[in-house]
Image: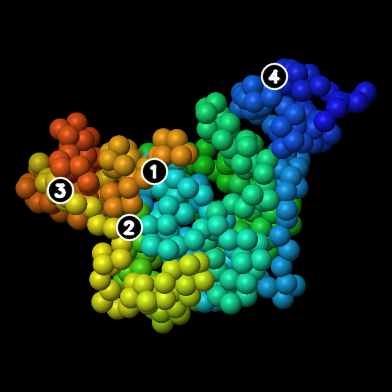
Amino acid sequence: MSHTAGRSSFPEMIMKKRDSVQLSPEEIHDFVEGVTSKTMQQSQIGAMLMAIWQKGMDFDETLELTKKMMNSGEVLHWSQDWLVVDKHSTGGVGDKISLILAPALAACGCKVPMISGRGLGHTGGTLDKLESIPGFKINLTVEEVKQTLQDVGCCIVGQTETLVPADRILYAIRDITSTVDSVPLITASIMSKKAAEGLSALVLDVKFGKAALCKDLESALQLAQSLVTVGNKLGIKTGAVLSRMDTPIGRCVGHTLEVYEALECLKGHGPDDLRNLVTTLGGCLLQMSGRSATLEDGENAISEVLKSRKALQKFQDMLVAQGVNAETSCSLCSENAEYFQYLQRAQYQTELRAVDDGTVLGVDGKAIADVLHKLGAGRSKTEDQIKYSVGAELLVDPGQPIQKGQPWIRIHHDCEKLSSQQQQNLEGALDIGSADVYQDSPRVAEFILPN
């Protein structure tokens, strides 16, 4: 791209942002165009990202960046009579919500074209979890996505080559330049992809706590407000749920273990905190999109399709539509499924025992995720191979009494034994104290819903 008279050069744009000057819509257009056409050097992109990270962007700049990124590739369009909805989570430990929520929403008559990501850092990716199911295909063409939505009502896929190419390039560079945690950059990244999906309504699960990107409620509110405002401005009914991310969601962490727990939840079992978060997020979407009169009605509708197993049937149909053998998907979704006949099981299991009597005050999800990452459950670079079978099962819940010597966690691993450092780090994850100190904090702290 040649820079004609009247256009800022890339160095000038970088300098303006570095000096806290607002960028014009034309300059933001040139930046995104420079990224996707590869006329901007990687070092210049990195410098611009760092300038944005340091100086921030105001609302108009953030909205403009989101629009330009959204239009850097194909934007999906659906049938007029479809109610197209989605959910996005800012990432957590044991977060298998999408696997349950997408089919539950489909069972309520919505269309859910969920475009998900892989895990990087300590949080697991939805795509990695699904790929632990033999045969599951995450790369569908736009035509295949449309067909699956037509036939099943939901699909969970990876980002296609043609959708928001600017984000794929910027995301990779943000990761290696330590500019991931910038509110305008996070907002533009998430909302450009969601807007390109052609959604009617979107709910965001913005997490805060020790195991989340946002460490406290205040920073989570700032991010949620930015995402919700941009979403609504783009014509998508957008709301957010702010949820605590200290203790893992549910009792299982790790790819195959989370698939097992998601299937249990779809069969009407599974931990209460997992089911409650699914019904809350689903209820928000049904209310925002006008399918339910109130949040409570929406939550009841989601509960009902879990209880009646209509959501389970949708999950089974989605597996088949995305390449899983019909016999495998039928067996996994049967009542007394032999899960590990199909899912990989780690060679070794090690149980850790409590060193004191008392009450479980909490379990540090980040500490557990970090150990699992080192055992092979996560990746440090995009191309790393991961071990689907590595994971952890919590054997206790916060608030319950525990006795010295009682097993509290089971680690699934492929190496012969855990190192003493890993054992020590895991032992530090369990917080035991007296019952009168325990505070039962609900997972959902706040809602930001559109009027």
Residue 425 picture location, percent across and down: 22, 35
Give the residue drawn at x 38%, y 62%. Answer: 133
- Residue 329 shows which numbered tag? none
Label 4 vs label 1, nearer the camera: 1
Earlier along the polypeptide chain: callout 4 or callout 1?
4
- Residue 18 shows which numbered tag? 4
Q: Using the image as rendered, state which of residue 240 and residue 311 is in the foreground.
A: 311
Mark 2 highlights which residue?
256
Residue 194 picture location, percent across and down: 64, 53
Residue 215 sits in which quadrant?
Answer: top left
Q: Identify the amino acid type marked 4.
A: Arg
Is 251 left, or right, of 315 in this rendering? left
Mark 1 highlights which residue?
385
In the figure, 386 relative to 374: above or below?
Answer: below
Q: Sort mark 1 into few (<14), some (14-19) or many (20+) by Cα contacts within 10 Å.
A: few
Earlier along the polypeptide chain: callout 3 or callout 1?
3
Earlier along the polypeptide chain: callout 2 or callout 3?
2
Give the residue drawn at x 75%, y 47%. Answer: 71
Q: Identify the amino acid type marked 1.
A: Gln
Q: Using the image as rendered, state which of residue 179 and residue 436 is in the foreground.
A: 179
Q: Identify the amino acid type marked 3.
A: Thr
Is 69 left, or right, of 294 in this rendering? right
Q: Identify the amino acid type marked 2.
A: Thr
Q: Is residue 261 visible?
A: no
Residue 221 picture location, percent across and down: 55, 43
Q: Secondary structure at mark 4?
A: helix
Label 2 and label 3: CA atoms lie apart by 17 Å
Callout 3 touching callout 1 (CB < 8 Å): no
Mark 3 highlights which residue?
350
Give the residue drawn at x 29%, y 78%. Answer: 335
Residue 250 sits in which quadrant?
Answer: bottom left
